[in-house]
Amino acid sequence: MAQILDGKALAKKIKEQVAAEAASLPRRPGLAVILVGENPASQVYVRGKEKDCEECGILNLGCKIPAETSEEELLRIIAEMNADPAVDGILVQLPLPKHIDEGKVLRAISPAKDVDCFHPENVGEMMVGDPICWPCTPFGVMELLREYGISAAGKHCVVLGRSNIVGKPMTLLLLRDNGTVTVCHSRTPDLKEQCLKADILVAAVGKVNLVTADMVKEGAVVIDVAMNRNEAGKLCGDVDYVAVAEKASYITPVPGGVGPMTRAVLMRNVLAAAKDHQK
């Protein structure tokens, strides 16, 4: 039976460390989360981030604006926050209303305040150097592996999904840890065969029970990044958890695995940005 990779416990430890460091700075770090409209899921995520800020001693400097807000007005708000020295991190909650160009908005955030690491300049820094902030979910996965003494070095890692938010940066971080990485996606013809090669399998597709026990080799480390709801409305990931846990050596639960780590790494990124701004 697999050992559980407890993201909730590690996230608590990381947030305690962030709170201690934030308290020692000359100025409290500040995070501005911008919520456009009233998407119910987005409201839940934003409330979670506000709670994290409170726990970590980070100022909540965000704003909530109506769904009909124009793209021009949103860009003006971002420009003001870029210029505000109290704001160390800016995060625009996605998805945005259809009349707003998501790419234009993400590029408008100053790279120095891009705590999600979505700006093309920071993506490039991640490719070739050592950025101030790392993408929250992939870096949360790497921190979770590190906490349990699991290295990607010399291992075959398979990433399911090629999104800009998880799949692509996850691949880069596993490579950085000296893993040999295969990326699978909707056009991969032999998905089961590829998964069976994985020493470390990361699922980030968004399809309930995509990964079944017959796709996982004995002793593999299985990381489930997805957050879905099954037919009963219960939260679940991409992995058939009960069956796969019988074969894996380590596995992340959903919820309580990668999700809390994403939020904790965001707080750490805000702290890192604040420290850089206060040099």
Image (spheres, rainbow, N blue to C red):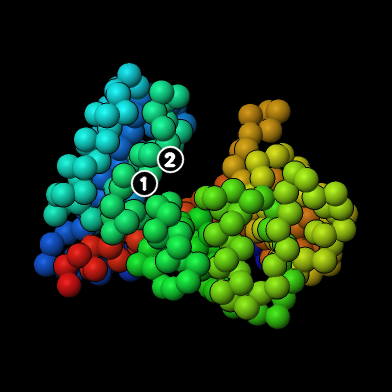
Q: CA distance from mark 1 to mark 2?
A: 6 Å
- Residue at image point 24% right, 68% down: 276
**In the rendered view of the protein, which quadrant contains the N terminus?**
bottom right
Name which quarter of the figure residue 237 lies in: top right
Across and down, in percent, residue 88 comes to 23, 55
- Which residue is outermost to the top? 68
Residue assigned mark 1: 107
Name which quarter of the figure residue 105 lies in: top left
- Residue at image point 82% right, 52% down: 191
- Residue at image point 58% right, 76% down: 177
Across and down, in percent, residue 27 comes to 13, 62
**In the rendered view of the protein, which quadrant contains the C terminus?**
bottom left
Residue assigned mark 2: 103
Q: Is residue 214 left or right of residue 262?
A: right
Element at label 2: helix
Name which quarter of the figure residue 216 lies in: bottom right
Q: Is residue 220 above or below residue 255?
A: below
* Viewer can see residue 140: yes
Q: Residues within 10 Å of mark 2 (few under 14, many from 20)?
A: few
* Dot 1 amino acid type: Arg
Q: Pointer 1 and pointer 2: residues touching (CB < 8 Å)?
A: yes
Please tell me which residue lies in front, 189 or 238: 189
Element at label 1: helix
Q: Is residue 146 above or below residue 81?
A: below
Across and down, in percent, residue 264 comes to 41, 57
* Dot 2 amino acid type: Gly
